[in-house]
Amino acid sequence: MSQMSFFDDETPKRDPDDLAEAEPEEQKEVMKAWFLAHYDDPVNVCPYESREGGFQYIWSGPYDAQEELSGEFGGVVDNDVIAECAQELVDEHSCYEWSGPPDYEQSDDYLAEAIETSRFCETFGHSLDTIRQLLEIDPPLASKGYFIRLLYASAITALEAYLSDAFIVTVFADRNLLCRLVATDPTLKARKVELTGLVRGDNTPEKIVREHLLQISWHNLARVRKLYKTVLGVDWPDRLGVLYNAVMIRHDIVHRNGRTTDGEERVLSREDVEGVIGAAKDLVNAIDEKVRQLQSDHDGSSEEPF
C-alpha cells in the first residue's frame, strides 16, 4: 500500500500533523478505519484448501496488521500506539493474517462461471470421500493432532461450499427467486444504486446480487438457514447441534491454531471427524432433493421481469 493512503475515498481525510497531535484512542480509531477499509479477514473472502496449506490468498496477502499500519502511519503515530492498535485488531477479529480486499469487478466473470458450472452435490460427495481417505493415513505422532484438526475443518469447508453453490446456482436460474431474494434480504433492500451505473452496465442487478452473495460467510448456519427458508422455501432439519458446535471448533482451528479462547488445545479424534462428516452429509441429503426439485420446476415455468 502507498504511504498516506488514508487520504483516499475509503476513509475520512486526516492531516498528518493533526493526527500526530490527536489522543491515542482517536489515532487508533483512525488507523482501524483505514485498515479495515483496505484489508479483510481471509475467512470472509478467501477459499480454504487444506491440501494447499490453508487459506488461498487470491486477493493478495497474507498481511500482518502491525507491519501494514507501521508502513502507513509510521512517523506520524507513535510505534507503541501502532502496536496496540494492531493487537486490538487481532483480538477483536480473531485474525492474525489478513487478506487484501476482494476485487469483484475483475473476478466477477470468473467466479460466476466457476459457480454456474459447479456440480455442487458431486463435489461435496467427492470432498467427503477424500477426507475419509485421508483419515486412513497414520501421520507421525507429533503432527497427528494438527492433521486431524485440518480434516475436521475441511469437512465444514466442504459443507460451506455446497451451501453457497447450491443456493447461488438455484437463485440465478430462476428470476422469481432472484426477485424474492432482493425483496427479502435487508442489505439488498437498503442498497442504493446510481442510475448512471445501471445505464452504463457497471452495476447490473445481477452483478450487485452476486457480489453480495459471494461475500456471505456460508458457515454462518443460522443466517444461511434463514436464506434457504425465506428465498427457496427449503426447510432444514431441526437437530443441527453437531454442526453448530463444529463451526465453533472450526473457528478455533482456523483463527487460533486449534486453541480455544482460554488457550486450551482442541483435541479431536478420527471419530470426531467422522461425526461432523455424517452430520454434514445428513444436512445435504435433507435439502438437496428439495433444491433439485426447485431447479426441475423452473425448467417449465414462466418468469417475472426483474
Image (spheres, rainbow, N blue to C red):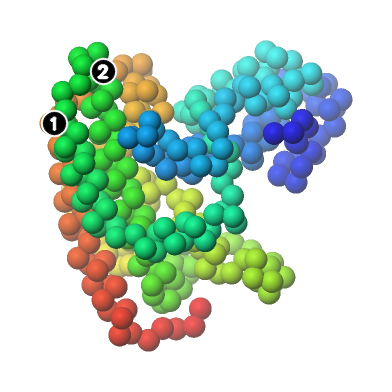
Q: Residue 253: x, y in percent? A: 34, 28
- Picture coordinates of residue 132, whole percent (x, y): 16, 38
The residue that mark 2 highlights is 143
In 3D space, how far apart are the residues under numbered discs 2 and 1 (Cα atoms)? 15 Å
Q: Give the residue drawn at x 13%, y 31%.
A: 136
| Number of marks in picture | 2
Asked whether the viewer can see residue 110, the reply is: yes
The residue tagged 1 is 136
From the viewer's perspective, is residue 29 above or below residue 207? Answer: above
User: Could you say where residue 305 lies in the image, as x and y percent from the top left?
Assistant: 49, 83
Tag 1: Cα neighbours inside 10 Å, few (<14), some, or many (≥20)? Answer: few
Give amino acid for label 1: Glu
Residue 20 picture quarter: top right
- Residue placed most toward the observer, 4 or 178: 4
Which amino acid is tagged 2? Ser
User: Mark 2 or mark 1, which has the lower sequence index?
Assistant: 1
**Horizontally, is 62 left or right of 170 in the view?**
right
The quarter of the image holding the N terminus is: top right
Q: Which residue appears at 72% of the width and 41% of the height?
A: 11
Q: Is residue 60 left or right of residue 226?
A: right
Instruction: Kindly state the secondary structure of the residue where label 2 is placed.
Output: helix
| Mark 2 Cα shell of 10 Å, populated few (<14), some (14-19), many (≥20) | few
